[in-house]
Amino acid sequence: ETTLDGAWTRRWIEAVAAAVAERKSALTALDRAIGDGDHGENLDRGFQAVLGKLDALDEQPTPGAVLKLVATTLISTVGGAAGPLYGTAFLKGAMAAGDRQALDAAALVEVLTAARDGIVARGKAEPNDKTMVDAWGPAVEAAAAAGDDVRAALEAAAGAAEAGAVATEPLVAHKGRASYLGDRAIGHRDPGAESSALILRVAAETQ
Ligand code: ADP
Ligand code: MG
Ligand code: MG
């Protein structure tokens, strides 16, 4: 049975940093339409800082140790709305992973659930408020329904998060800067939902 160990978690985070750098302009363009045009820069700054700290990890870190390093680094470098939200997600995910050496599908679902719950506790967004919760909520449900194959759970989470991000387009926002725009947010995809889907898609693609 496949599981996700600390080395996998590190490869995932390195791939996320590369993907965020590549998608930086696109994420910022989404935020320029319904926010303040900094989401790509914010996340890129955070994940580049994470890259600089990965070598401080043990040689064989637990998944939880990697997630905790990501959390503390994002909290101190990203700022804005997304910094504390992603920081909380990774911190709660780290706590759910605990001291496990590797995550099976059930543990992965616990981690994703804790991340989603952390975002909701911190930002108080409900489903369809046009936020990153609209990616994380469906991702958790799809992963939980995917059975005991961890690769299938990752693929299900990524697909559901992508669909959730697309489904933010017709919505009016009720949280974050986009909520100031009223109906003018309609027709634009939420940047945080898009970056969340990207992070989960990269997880599904990380071997
Ligand atoms: P800022 O809005 O401070 O410039 P970012 O542009 O980095 O921060 O992040 C904006 C994203 O944060 C939004 O697209 C949305 O997904 C997310 N967001 C904002 N407020 C909330 C909230 N209360 N709950 C969940 N997500 C939120
Ligand atoms: Mg912004
Ligand atoms: Mg900002």
Image (spheres, rainbow, N blue to C red):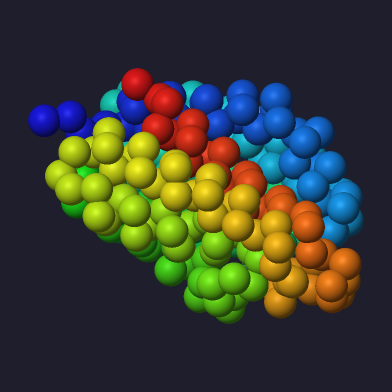
State left or right for residue 56 relative to residue 125. left
Depth order, front residue of 116/97: 116
Q: Identify the residue at horizontal 54%, vertical 72% (top origin).
A: 127
Q: Residue 133's spot in the image, x, y percent?
A: 55, 63
Residue 170, located in which quarter of the rendered image? Answer: bottom right
Question: Can the viewer see residue 101 in this picture?
Answer: no
Measuring 15% from the left and 44% from the top, which residue is drawn there?
Answer: 148
Q: Is residue 178 above or below residue 155?
A: below
Left or right of residue 141: residue 35 = right
Q: Is residue 144 left or right of residue 70?
A: left
Residue 113 appears in which quarter of the rendering?
Answer: bottom left
- Position in image of residue 107 (x %, y %): 22, 50
Q: Please tell me which residue lies in front, 180 or 62.
A: 180
Say above or below: 1 vs 178: above
The residue drawn where x is 31% and y is 32% is: 6
> Residue 54's spot in the image, x, y percent?
50, 29
List the single residue furthest toward the left: 1
Residue at screen point 84% across, 42% down = 29
